Image (tube, grey):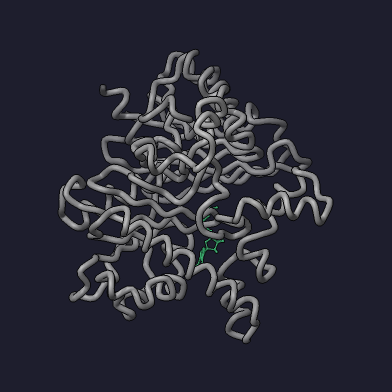
Amino acid sequence: MNILVVNTGSSSLKYQLFDMDTTVSMAGGVVERIGEEQGVLNHKDFSKGREEKTRLEQKIEDHREAMHLAASLITHNIDAVGHRVVQGGEAFKEAVIIDQAVKEAVRENNSLAPLHNPPNLIGIEVAEDLFPGKPQVAVFDTNFHQTLPEKAFLYGLPYEYYQKYKIRKYGFHGTSHKYVAGRAAELMEKPAREINLITLHLGNGCSISAVKGGRCVDTSMGMTPLAGVMMGTRTGDLDPAIFGYLMDHTGMSQKEMDEVLNKKSGLKGICGHNDLRDIHALAQKGDRLAILAVDMFAYQIKKYIGSSAAALGRVDGLVFTAGIGENDDIVRARILEELDFLGIDLDEEKNKIRSGQARAIHKDISRVQIWVVPTNEELQIAMETCEVLER
Ligand code: ADP
């Protein structure tokens, strides 16, 4: 079965085609700057055993045109389409075949994810037109976290706000946490139900999940992807009173505050940069704020490992993934400093080896295994699409 995975952002479209008999990607690409003067499409085809690249630079009016362009470059038959949808609210605990009711439910969650759900919905509607009669499946970022118990997902607010306004922790990056937790169980040669893992998705956005016997029991992001640890440009957890205090003292509107919290904070807010490669270069030259930014980032993640360990009761493995988690040995080492009291012992030499492969980086004596596992959200969406269709 050939599954096309579609991920639509506000001005971008990512897509990948998998042959699910082999789980190999046959083609894929990214369309960026949709709606701007000059759009760009980068397409790769792997089906002839080598990589063939196509690049188009032209005005790409909207997602419809972007999807048509992408589809025109895919020469294979498509049996079904799997869509990434960011916010499924409480309505979806697993992937679902998309029908009118599902689209309505996605629309109802627009206010919880105003930047993400609307473009996701456009992607679905364009794919329905483009591939009529082919099943369309939605895989929600929030699915994997729907197993959180009430004590973990509720905030200490009046209970009626949960009932009236759906205010609760939803968690994000669920597809990635699920994929790497599954891969780690295979690599550790244990059934997923028998092991407890802490999965650390550290990219531009960062989230940490506690996964007990294959089920997520807690996660660092909240009602929105702003919560948890500080990130490239997002604050992470704040004293909620800071919001009103800052608005009073600066005269910023709520929109301006949102911009500061989402785009001007985190690593960038502390040292002016959000890419850790730039920050390490500055830190090496002795830049005090770059050193501080890395210190803060690693410390906050370390504390989430502690709270996740407490939530789990026993930890068998830590799993690092995404841009920073997979590539940044300096940050991994800083996070794991002095965690031997939890049975976490990093092998410094193994940690420094660069590789695109999944690998173990713990010492033989470490009670907790430590793994680096490249994430593959697209493949996870394709796998879940297949599962739903087979069911
Ligand atoms: P996104 O959340 O956009 O998918 P990624 O998972 O691609 O983000 O992560 C992007 C971040 O990963 C970059 O901002 C950078 O800090 C970090 N990163 C990527 N490659 C490396 C590397 N080789 N060394 C250190 N950090 C890296």
Q: Nearer the viewer, residue 309 or 390?
A: 309
- Please tell me which residue is depicted at 69% across the width and 51% down the height of the picture: 243
How many discs mark residues in the rendered view?
A: 0
Above/below status of 167 relative to 189? above
Above/below status of 103 relative to 202? above
* Residue 264: x %, y % from top left: 70, 58
Above/below status of 29 relative to 64? below
Q: Nearer the viewer, residue 345 or 52?
A: 345
User: Farthest residue toward the bottom?
Assistant: 286
- Please tell me which residue is depicted at 59% across the width and 72% down the height of the picture: 293
- Please tell me which residue is depicted at 34% across the width and 62% down the height of the picture: 372
Relative to residue 81, is residue 362 drawn left or right? left
Inspect this view and state whether residue 19 appears: no
Which quadrant of the rendered structure holds the N terminus?
top left
* Residue 377: x %, y % from top left: 41, 44
* Residue 354: x %, y % from top left: 39, 71
Relative to residue 226, is residue 309 drawn left or right? left
Which quadrant of the rendered structure holds the C terminus?
top left
User: Farthest residue toward the right?
Assistant: 251
Q: Quadrant of residue 231?
A: bottom right
Q: Quadrant of residue 31?
A: top right
Above/below status of 376 relative to 291? above
Q: Quadrant of residue 112?
A: top right
* Residue 25: x %, y % from top left: 38, 43
- Please tell me which residue is depicted at 47% across the width and 58% down the height of the picture: 202
Inspect this view and state whether residue 250 appears: yes
